[in-house]
Image (spheres, helix red, strand yellow):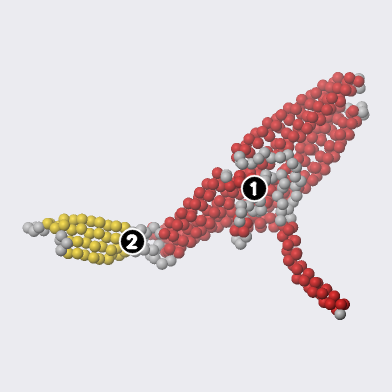
């Protein structure tokens, strides 16, 4: 009995594992596809605050409020009540004069179907404006990335040059010791002093560029803190070029805004075609004539006679809708090219950094060995300084490659709508 129960339990466990396998596999794919942004980016809450407060984003939000007001206007319609008042004095030859007056109330009426089109046009306008807000935020995010990594590049260059100056100062001390001992010529001391002066001047220039980029960053995004000097190794996110191009096109606000604009213009074309049958105007008239002896109550209907202008307006909207559709197609191609370029820059950037980092480590070890060899009198100063210069250039190249790779990865995530998302926005785009 125990054996049979164990076998049955084993089957139940195995069956449950088989049923859970697809779920676990899907969770694994989702975890693999989740890309982590570079760790040297500003804190996400601060970045979101900086993007929300950007003037272009606030301008786009004002445009969205205007679009919502326009939607309300279209829903209400352009027809309003009109009040007409008039007075007259009737004179009959040889007879008495009589006072007369009249009052009228009139209003145009939208024909069935036009109100629904107006509401749809307003709704598309609101959606387009909301996408413009997202596009403005995206453009502000691109500016933030460029300014942020420009500061980091300048800071890394200044830091490495200042470190180079410190190493050359130590090298000068070693040379001076050898000169005092008589193991080195006075020419070596002058050469070491010149190398130190060049490194110090380069460090000062790099620090000036760092301060300039920091000032530009603070001017564009005053909410951001000063970047830290912490290094972050580049990591390429999961997926291939085609995957990231598809992600970019799926979530791009510019494409969605152009699509909503084309839909709005097509609806405007249908609305202009519906205006081929003009809206009537109904009126109620009450008049008092012959000093009140006669009273008149009547209804009136006025109907404009459509002309060529109405048909031409429909063709105008149709042409604009076709142009907007072509703009969407052109933007899609351009964005696909940008996304492919982003992926290639990220992939090649990570690979280049790995190679340059290995070269920088080897150059650093060679420079350290050259320093020790010079201290022991086994190598000349010129070769030692050349080794030190080569190590610095390798370190600069590796650091620049690291930051460029991180910027490319961050740009890839930003364009694919996976970085700095305001609350709820990812869900809004999931079904588009």
Residue appearing at x 61%, y 49% in the figure: 138
Residue 107, numbered circle? 2
Q: Which dot, 1 or 2, sits closer to the camera?
A: 1
Q: Is residue 415 left or right of residue 381?
A: left
Query: Do residues under tags 1 and 2 come within 8 Å of each other at their CB atoms?
Result: no
Name which residue lies at 70% across and 30% down: 205
**Image quadrant where residue 282 sits:** bottom left
Residue 250 in picture, x, y percent from top left? 63, 58
**Is residue 1 among the parts visible in the rendering?**
yes
Label 1 – label 2 distance at C-alpha? 53 Å
Residue 350 x %, y %: 76, 47
The residue that mark 1 highlights is 45
- Report if residue 341 is visible in the image: no
What secondary structure is marked by label 2? Answer: strand
Secondary structure under the numbered disc 1 in the rendered image? helix
Image location of residue 40, percent across then percent down: 71, 44
């Amino acid at each position: 009995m125990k054996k049979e129960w164990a076998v049955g339990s084993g089957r139940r466990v195995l069956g449950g594992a088989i049923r859970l396998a697809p779920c676990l596999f899907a969770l694994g794919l989702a975890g693999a596809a989740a890309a982590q942004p570079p760790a040297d980016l500003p804190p996400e809450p601060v970045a979101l605050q900086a993007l929300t407060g950007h003037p272009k984003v606030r301008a786009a939000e004002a445009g969205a409020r205007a679009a919502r007001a326009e939607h309300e206007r279209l829903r209400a319609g352009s027809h309003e009540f009109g009040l007409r008042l008039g007075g007259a004095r009737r004179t009959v030859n040889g007879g008495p004069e009589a006072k007369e007056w009249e009052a009228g109330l009139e209003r145009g009426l939208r024909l069935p179907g036009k109100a629904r089109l107006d509401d749809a046009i307003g709704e598309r306008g609101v959606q387009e404006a909301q996408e413009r807000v997202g596009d403005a935020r995206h453009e502000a995010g691109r500016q933030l990335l460029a300014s942020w990594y420009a500061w980091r590049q300048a800071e890394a260059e200044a830091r490495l040059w200042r470190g180079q100056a410190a190493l050359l100062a130590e090298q000068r001390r070693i040379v001076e010791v050898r000169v005092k001992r008589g193991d080195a010529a006075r020419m070596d001391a002058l050469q070491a002093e010149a190398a130190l002066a060049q490194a110090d001047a380069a460090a000062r220039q790099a620090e000036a560029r760092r301060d300039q980029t920091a000032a530009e960053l603070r001017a564009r995004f005053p909410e951001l803190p000063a970047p830290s000097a912490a290094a972050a190794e580049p990591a390429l996110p999961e997926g291939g070029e085609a995957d990231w191009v598809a992600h970019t096109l799926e979530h791009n606000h510019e494409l969605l805004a152009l699509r909503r604009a084309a839909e709005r213009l097509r609806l405007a074309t249908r609305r202009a075609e519906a205006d081929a049958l003009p809206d009537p105007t109904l009126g109620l008239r009450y008049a008092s004539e012959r000093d009140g002896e006669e009273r008149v109550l009547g209804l009136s209907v006025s109907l404009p006679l459509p002309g060529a202008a109405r048909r031409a307006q429909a063709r105008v909207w149709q042409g604009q809708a076709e142009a907007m559709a072509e703009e969407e197609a052109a933007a899609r191609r351009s964005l696909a090219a940008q996304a492919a370029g982003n992926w290639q820059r990220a992939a090649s950037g990570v690979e280049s950094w790995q190679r340059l980092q290995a070269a920088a480590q080897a150059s650093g070890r060679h420079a350290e060995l050259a320093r020790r060899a010079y201290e022991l009198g086994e190598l000349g100063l010129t070769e030692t300084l050349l080794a030190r210069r080569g190590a610095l250039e390798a370190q600069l190249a590796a650091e620049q490659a690291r930051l460029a790779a991180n910027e490319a990865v961050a740009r890839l995530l930003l364009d694919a709508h996976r970085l700095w998302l305001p609350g709820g926005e990812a869900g809004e785009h999931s079904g588009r």
